[in-house]
Image: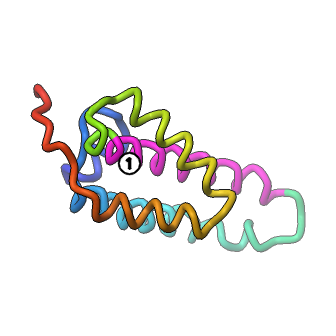
Amino acid sequence: MDNFTSLFKLDEPIGRLKFFLNSVLILIVMLALSAPFYAVLSASNGTKGPVAIILCLVWFYLTFTNVSKRFWDITGQKMKAIWFTVGYFVTMIIPIVSAVIYIILLFMPGKDLDVAE
């Protein structure tokens, strides 16, 4: 449950394992949120736009927070991590580049920062 609550706030850096587990959890959450709306999203009428936008915003927020926390662990600085995350989202235009960066995030060791509780 600790992994799930940490998805919603940018409160501390996270290590490689927690980053991976959070990524899997985000995937599960997005699938669970998308499943009830599958009929709406596959419909040809105009109702799918608002649902798709809301789902994309939820995915964006959760992923941005997760990636920022991982960059925070790697760089040691919160603001630098946020800017690196913005750059990461820009690289999503080229999927192979963002996939390589994601793999680097999975395997690059962090700084093992002590964060005050």
Q: For the point 11% across and 26% down, which residue is it?
A: 116
Q: For the point 26% across and 34% down, which residue is it?
A: 76
> Is the stretch drawn in magenta largely helix, strand or loop?
helix
**Location of residue 21 by image quarter:** bottom left
The C terminus sits in image quarter = top left
Residue furthest right as drawn? 45
Residue 89, x across and y down, in percent: 58, 48
Q: Secondary structure at mark 1?
A: helix
Asked whether residue 55 is in view, the answer is no
Q: Which residue is mark 1?
A: 66
Magenta region: 47-71
Question: In the displayed structure, does residue 61 sit left or right of residue 77?
Answer: right
Residue 106, x across and y down, in percent: 32, 63
Residue 7, x across and y down, in percent: 34, 46
Closer-to-camera residue (41/67): 67
Question: In the displayed structure, does residue 41 sit left or right of residue 27?
Answer: right
Q: How many marks?
A: 1
Residue 48 lies in the magenta stretch: yes
Closer-to-camera residue (83/37): 83
Mark 1 crowd level (few <14, some 14–19, many ≥20, 10 Å Cα) = many
Asked whether residue 80 is in view, the answer is yes
**Location of residue 43 by image quarter:** bottom right
Q: For the point 45% across and 66% down, which residue is it?
A: 27
Residue 49, x across and y down, in percent: 79, 54
Residue 98 lies in the magenta stretch: no
The N terminus sits in image quarter = bottom left
In the rendered view, would you say 11 is above or below 63? above
Looking at the rendered structure, the kind of residue marked 1 is Asn
